[in-house]
Structure formats: C-alpha cells, structure tokens
Image (cartoon, helix red, strand yellow):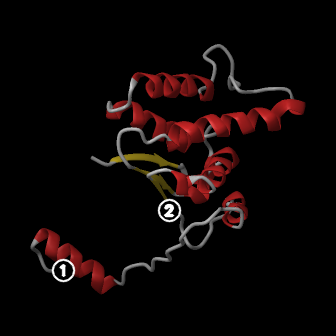
Amino acid sequence: KMSVWTGRCLEGGRTAAFWPWVQVLRDALREGSLGPAPKQEIQKLLLELSPSPDTSHHVLDVEASSAVAARFWVLEKLSRVLLSAETAPRVVLLDDVQWADEASLDLLIFLSAELSRAPVLVVATARGALPPGSEAWAKALGRLGPCERIELVGLRSADVEQYVAEVTGFDL
C-alpha cells in the first residue's frame, strides 16, 4: 500500500511557517500505519510547529543569533520523519508552492538532496506565471536538488467542453 500525504499553500502566503508540512504530518498521523515511535515524533513536531496557546509566537521562536541553528534542526527533524518510510513507499503532494513560506521552501530544498535514499516521491505543484508575493519560490527553484520539472499547459476550451460532455453525458 502506498501512502499519499498532502499539504496546500494558501494564496498570498499568509500562513504560519511550515504550514503545508504541518498538513502533511497530520495526514501521516491520520493514516494510522505508522509505528509508535514515528507517531510520537510527529506529534512532538506538530506541537513545536504550532502557535503557543498563550502567546502569538511559535514555540520555535528563538533569539536571532541562534535562529539559523534552530531552523536547521527543525529541517533535520522534519526530513528524518518524512524520509523514514518504514512501512511502505509514500507520495508527498504539495500544492500551490508558489505561495509557500520561506521555511517550507527550505524544507523542500533540504529534502530534495535526500530523496534518492528513501522510497518517497515529492510532487510540488506551482503556477507557471508567478503571482506577486511568490519571489521566495522563484529563488528556491534554483536551489532545489536533483528533480524533474514538468511544464503543463492549460486546457483549450474545446478540451474542457469535451471533458465535461464525457463526465456528465451532456453536450455543451
């Protein structure tokens, strides 16, 4: 059985750091096929990545001098969990990454260098014409490790009409 875990970036990038990855981790927990150790690690990571209930900041907020080191260890923990496919191969689907926050893109870049070592496929979708506010994605494209980029073109009106007719049984 292959697992599929998904995360979606929200338009405009107005989410907490690592938001699409938090969704991926939640999918992993819902799946129920993880052993107790990975499940506990994911629960711990979700607590670290969530806003503290009594403050507006994240648990991972640290002094500026140690922010880079703290970010590295968060990336390392997340990648270790995501790449440990003990039970079966998995697909991680990230949608609309042109809106991803910088921390989420850092994790995608971090993972891209390690993917050949695990039965994990990461599929990230992004719009071809980058909207304003997606500069971080444009920069991240150049830093991704080995990956295959597939450009898709939009459907023509005739293609959409044919698809709708086939699905609904009604001609447009």
What type is the residue that disc 2 sits on?
Thr
Farthest top residue in view: 54
Q: Secondary structure at mark 1?
A: loop
Above or below residue 97? Residue 160 is below
What type is the residue that disc 1 sits on?
Leu
Query: In this view of the protein, which residue sits in the foreground, 92 or 97?
Result: 92
Quarter of the image where one finds residue 164: bottom left
Above or below residue 27? Residue 105 is below
- The residue carrying mark 1 is 172
Q: Give the foreground label among 2 and 1.
A: 2
Q: Alpha carbon of mark 2 to alpha carbon of mark 1: how far?
A: 30 Å
Q: Position of residue 149 (x, y in %)?
A: 54, 72
Q: Secondary structure at mark 2?
A: loop
Q: Position of residue 150 (x, y in %)?
A: 49, 74
Quarter of the image where one finds residue 30: top left
* x 76%, y 32%: residue: 70
Report crowding for label 2: few under 14, some 14 to 19, many 20 or more residues within 10 A (C-alpha): some
Above or below residue 78? Residue 160 is below
* x 38%, y 31%: residue: 34
Query: In this view of the protein, which residue sits in the foreground, 150 or 77?
Result: 77
- The residue carrying mark 2 is 125
Horizontal arrangement in the rendering, residue 21 relative to residue 85 (left or right): right
Farthest right residue in view: 65
* x 46%, y 23%: residue: 37
